[in-house]
Amino acid sequence: MFAVYAEALHPDDPLAGLALGERPEPDPPEGWTTVDVKAASLNHHDLFSLQGVGLTEDRLPMILGCDAAGVDQDGNEVVVHAVISTPDWTGDETLDPKRSLLSEVHQGALAEQVTVPRRNVVPKPASLSFEQAACLPTAYLTAYRMLFTQSGLRPGDTVLVQGAGGGVATALVTLARAAGLRVYVTSRSERKRARALKLGAHEAVDSGARLPTRVDAVMETVGAATWSHSLKSLRPGGTVVVSGTTSGPDPDSAELRRIFFLQLRVQGSTMGTRDELRGLTGLMDVTGARPLVDRVLPLDHARDGFTAMAEGDLFGKVVFTV
Ligand SMILES: NC(=O)c1ccc[n+]([C@@H]2O[C@H](COP(=O)([O-])OP(=O)(O)OC[C@H]3O[C@@H](n4cnc5c(N)ncnc54)[C@H](OP(=O)(O)O)[C@@H]3O)[C@@H](O)[C@H]2O)c1
């Protein structure tokens, strides 16, 4: 079958190890199902994989991709949950110390077929297209858990989303608006700030600029470059939810004095559970909110999507059709 995979790892030149071509069809173990992929989407995780973050040489070649929507062996239209927990794990899958994401240990979703444990598929609402549904399993699920499980935010509260153009960031803006939050965003790019306003943000400011008011919570995926601004933007007792460090994991200062004196809460967040993925599909179905898609490409043009992400030239998700 046709697939997009990593054949080598290059920390400084991720695209050098990217390959497109034939890979063996999956051979699902007992209790797993094979999904005919209709659409799949790209995440920063795929670039990190090509750099050797979360992926080791001994697992190559590895089909990339965490996100897919398609049709399972029983003919159901499904969305794939990308968090693979150990078979006997019960409860919150993201807390399983041995969990992995598709494409880290098991072959990923940028292919004509992907195989996953049966419990890792949830029904796709008829109101969502395969392209829209393929955006949900990583960026939108991560945003959903950050906003609705980890932040303590309630409708009417105010939230800051750092780095407006990213896949998770645009998901955060869309879901926060759907849930009745006041949304501020930052971006280094004037064009991206304008697009964030169009997407539904109430205010958009330059990265690092002062906000109109302090916020109840900050959604942080940029990391070192925005950490200090995130802490300074919080009201006393506010929460910063961290799920990524695109600009690096080590800020100049952790600013511990500010954290204890203002009684700030720092909350990590990773992906989401299958139940949260069901909640997310339900939220989209009920509210009519839709994932923001930057571009749709056929899977055999995947290199163009990877290049655009590596250059930071995106606003929303890159979707591949199969
Ligand atoms: N924990 C989890 O489960 C989980 C799940 C999904 C993603 N993540 C992580 O979340 C992060 C975002 O993922 P993504 O797929 O949304 O990536 P993405 O689409 O590539 O997002 C990148 C965004 O980060 C901002 N950015 C990058 N470098 C910056 C800098 N030096 N200063 C300020 N802003 C900068 C940019 O915002 P502007 O250009 O608008 O300024 C850009 O739009 C990644 O680190 C990813 O690994 C974690």
Image: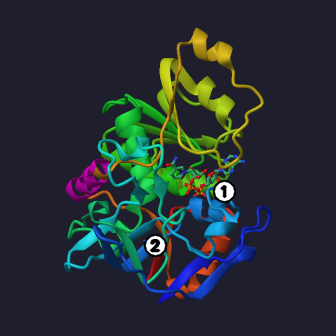
Q: Position of residue 218 (x, y in %)?
A: 51, 33
Q: Any magenta on residue 279?
A: yes
Question: Would you say the residues marked 2 and 1 are in contact, meaning their CB atoms lie under 8 Å apart?
Answer: no
- Upstream in sequence: badge 2 or badge 1: 1
Q: Residue at x 45, y 57 (%)?
A: 138
Q: Which mark is residue 53?
A: 1
Mark 2, Cα crowd under 10 Å, few <14 / some 14-19 / many 20+, is many
- Residue positioned 56% across, 12% down in the render: 262
Q: Tell me what residue is drawn at x 52 percent, y 66 percent.
A: 103
Q: Is residue 79 left or right of residue 15?
A: left
Left or right, 235 with respect to 285, comes to right
Label 1, secondary structure: give it. Answer: loop
Tell me where residue 157 sits by quadrant: top left
- What residue did someone put label 2 on? 109
Q: Secondary structure at mark 2?
A: loop
Q: Amino acid at mark 2?
A: Ala
Amino acid under label 1?
Val
Instruction: Based on the picture, tell me whether residue 187 belongs to the magenta stretch.
Output: no
Q: What's the magenta bit mostly, secondary-structure-wise? A: helix
Q: Using a 10 Å C-alpha cutoff, classify the residue at mark 1 as few (fewer than 14 neighbours), some (14 to 19) or many (20 or more).
A: some
Q: Report the residue at 67% width, 53% height from top.
A: 189
Q: Is residue 1 left or right of residue 248?
A: left
Foreground of the two, 205 or 129: 129
Q: Quadrant of residue 301?
A: bottom right
Q: Which residues are magenta?
A: 275-287
Coordinates of residue 69 in the picture (x, y in percent) = 35, 72
